Image (cartoon, rainbow, N blue to C red):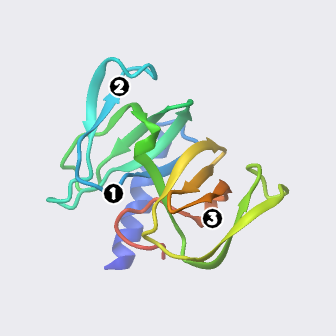
Amino acid sequence: MRTIYCLLLIMLLTNACNSYNYKGHCLLIPQHEKISLYKSPKGITKIDYIINDTINEDYPLISIAEITDSMALIYAQYPMQTRNRTTGWINKDYLGIYLVPKDTIPIHVLPSYDSTVSSYIIDAYWGKYYYILDISNEWLKVFDPDTPKVVGWLAPEFQSSNPYTPPC
């Protein structure tokens, strides 16, 4: 069953990315709440909403195109298709990422493998939610709300935007 979820996620993300200029992927904050999408980064005109549909177990797969100081331009689609695909600006406080389970994950000062490592996440596990501050070429600048000292850039191979199951 886990393999089927992984294959489904790969197919959906590949399909989503073919028609959308994205810089990375993320998750919606893990709660059952309608989150407004806006027409512009000013956040004035609501055009739609996205939600982690815990009743139907249909969680949006989200691609990020751009991040400003407080907003992110996203593309969201639902694997179970209970809602239509949608695009809009969202308050970036609602976006985050899970980690790939590893003993040690380096957090960099800049979004580059050549950058200095500022800290390490020890005993990383899937399901621990990290908030997103910025994005650059699939690298996510993240912070841990439980440990505010952990702030920095997370390489793509340590990110898990699968809301259903840990990485294969």
Percent from the top left, x then y, of residue 69?
56, 30
Residue linked to disc 2? 38
Answer few, some or many: residues within 10 Å of disc 3's Cα (few below 14, many 20 plus, some between 14 and 19): few
| Helix, strand or loop under label 2 | strand
The residue under label 1 is 30
Q: Label 3 amino acid?
A: Glu
Callout 3: SS = helix
Q: Earlier in the sequence, mark 1 or mark 2?
A: 1
| Residue 134 image point, x, y percent | 60, 42
Q: Mark 1 or mark 2, which is nearer to you?
A: 1
How far apart are the alpha carbons under marks 1 and 2? 20 Å
Quadrant, the N terminus: bottom left
Circle 2 packing at 10 Å, graded few (<14), some (14-19), many (20+), is: many
The mark nearer the N terminus, 1 or 3, is 1
Residue 157 marker: 3
**33 to the left or right of 156:** left
Discs 3/2, front: 2
The three-letter code of the residue at mark 1 reads: Pro
Instruction: Give 103 or 82, whichever is nearer the viewer.
Output: 103
Q: Which mark is residue 50?
A: none
Give yes or no for contact between labels 1 and 3 (Cβ–Cβ under 8 Å): no
102 lies above or below 35? below
